[in-house]
Image (tube, rainbow, N blue to C red):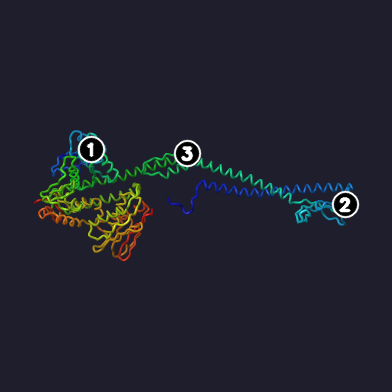
Amino acid sequence: MKVLIAEDEVALQESIVKFLERDGFVCESASNHKEALYKIDLYDYDIVILDINLISGSGLDVLKTLKKEGKKSGVIIISANNSLDDKLEGLDLGADDYITKPFHLPELNARIKAVLRRGKYGGDSCLIYHEIKVNTESRQTFVNNKEVQLTKKEYDLLVYFIVNKNRVLSKEVIAEHLWGDHIDLADNFDFIYVHINNLRTKLTKVAANYIKTVYGMGYRLTEE
Amino acid sequence: MTDGSEKKIKLLKKTSKNYLLSGVILMVLSLIGLYFVTQYFIREETDDSLKSTLYRIEQLLEAKQPISSVHPIIEVQKTQIEGTASLKDTLINDPLEDEEEVFRQLSAYKSVDGETYKISIRILLVESEDILLAILASYITIIFIIFLAQFYFSRQHAKVIWKPFFDNLEQIKTFSLQSNQKLSFVETNILEFSELNNELRALTDKVILDYKNLKQFTEDVSHEIQTPLAIMQAKVGNIIDDNVISTKQFKLLTEIQQNVQRLAGLNKKLVLLAKIENQQYETSQSLDITEQLTKAVEEFKEMSAIPIHYTPSGSILVRIDSTLAQVLMDNLISNAVKHTPEDGIIKVDIANNTITIANSGKNSIADPNKLYNRFYQESASKKSLGLGLAIVKKICDRYDLTIDYHFENKFHYFTLRFPKN
């Protein structure tokens, strides 16, 4: 999977590249508007991560060019601006998702994989982790081909674990993913434990064991 | 729009009222004036006529012509004593109508050949009174008709003249900074209106420009702060992801992350406050705010162990931006959750266009007036920024909602009242 990261802040660009490469993505970066236009013209990317405020031009222009040329890349807009207008404009122009700075890297990772899964970019809508299978189209979960009924939050939690497998996810990162902006209003993150426990009890004993508590840190999905 | 304490009156009504009032006063005054002037002249005429009659009678007496009295108009009597001449009004029984009538009477004494005559000449005053009344009546009729016609025409005329002004006033009323639409004034050849239009145009252009600059500034600040925060967040994320750190280091890094998040949240909230203050949220549609309430309650039930007693019931239609409606409900519920002791509960009630959110507490808030101040903290809670209720208050002010606090039976009550439609 090829990803273009069009971000004028090199430090942020490098961090994203480093994080995504661990998951096997092939990453390229563009540090300004011109470079981004040049690269999308020359190569085909599965995903383009686009900062809306690029030096010397708007990321939205890059998005327009991308769509005009009929490129099949999925587009995720990064913006420092939480304004609804920008968000709607980006999505209207054909962006697949929109993420506001600052964000957690596992969150960006999850968004990229969600865009890829949506089919039109050639991804598989099923997530498989050993005996756990999640159909993201019908939002059904199976363990050993037997359906398991999960609540919306438990389902989101499981998907988040699978797309960020082998990574330690802190309570904060998980809470931010599940509750978004509401998390600013929470006074602590202990409630995450309750939801993880509920998820574990619904999976089989073996499957539940994949979700490991990393003492003092958070949780990790791993087979070890 | 708040009216002043005194009642406002429409311009055309006001000018008409003044016109009518001054017209009536002038009419009454001129009528009184006319009465006295006419009466004066009629008196003069009557007296002149009496004097000329007297002169003729004296001539006749001197010429020794016989004079017969005509009661009560002319009376000539011989008399012993010579009095002084007098001119006065007097009451005399008029045999024609057999009642007392007012006569103007001129009495004089004339001596001819040792004989003294008393001559009294009278004119019935009723006649002149009738003339006076006729004059006054025709005067008032004519004046009244002219006055009414003038009033009608000037009113019509004023309507035409002021029309561009009222049209432009309607335009200004619909002016909204958000719509980004310039005002297009109705042009007129009246200098003052044209000047007013130009000034208003200049003013609104400046306001629009200032507003844009302010908005741009808000966005720039938000952008400039969020980017370094994003870099810090990503770098910490990289270190954690490298999996080479100890639990102790992880704790430190998570604390950095938490504070980055906190700073980002603070920034977001300040931008939100600024946006509400700058009225950057439009009130386009009416929505049922209990939906936002239900959503907020559901979210917080998942995030907190404190029981929230809430039964969705009825609906409250409010004209409010949907994002702000959600922020309002989230902040109120969040405030309740944060300040409820572990064994406490939260009660949410909907009734008669009010939403009441109550949470257990030990004591009333020391200074409820400060409750909605920015960064006001009743207790040093590590997570709270002290902006939640400030935002609530701002949203309430923006949409004319009222929020009240009171403490009763170990519960803090926040009551949100919505305007009735």
Q: Can you identify the residue that label 3 sits on?
A: B194
Q: Is residue A74 left or right of residue A131?
A: right
> In the rendered image, is residue B358 in sight?
yes
Looking at the picture, do discs 3 and 1 lie on one chain?
A: no
Mark 2 Cα shell of 10 Å, populated few (<14), some (14-19), many (≥20): some
Q: Is residue B2 above or below residue B149?
A: below
Instruction: Check disc 3 and give the amino acid type.
Output: Ser
| Protein chain holding label 1 | A
- Identify the secondary structure beneath mark 1: loop
Residue at horizontal 62 percent and vertical 48 percent from the top: B27
Within the image, what quadrant is residue A45 found in? top left
Q: Can you identify the residue that label 2 sits on?
A: B111
Instruction: Check disc 1 and give the amino acid type.
Output: Asn
| Protein chain holding label 3 | B
Q: Is residue A38 above or below residue A126?
A: above
Q: Position of residue A126 (x, y in %)?
A: 15, 45
Residue at horizontal 50 percent and vertical 38 percent from the top: B190
Q: Can you identify the residue that label 1 sits on?
A: A32
Q: Quadrant of the N terminus of chain A?
A: top left
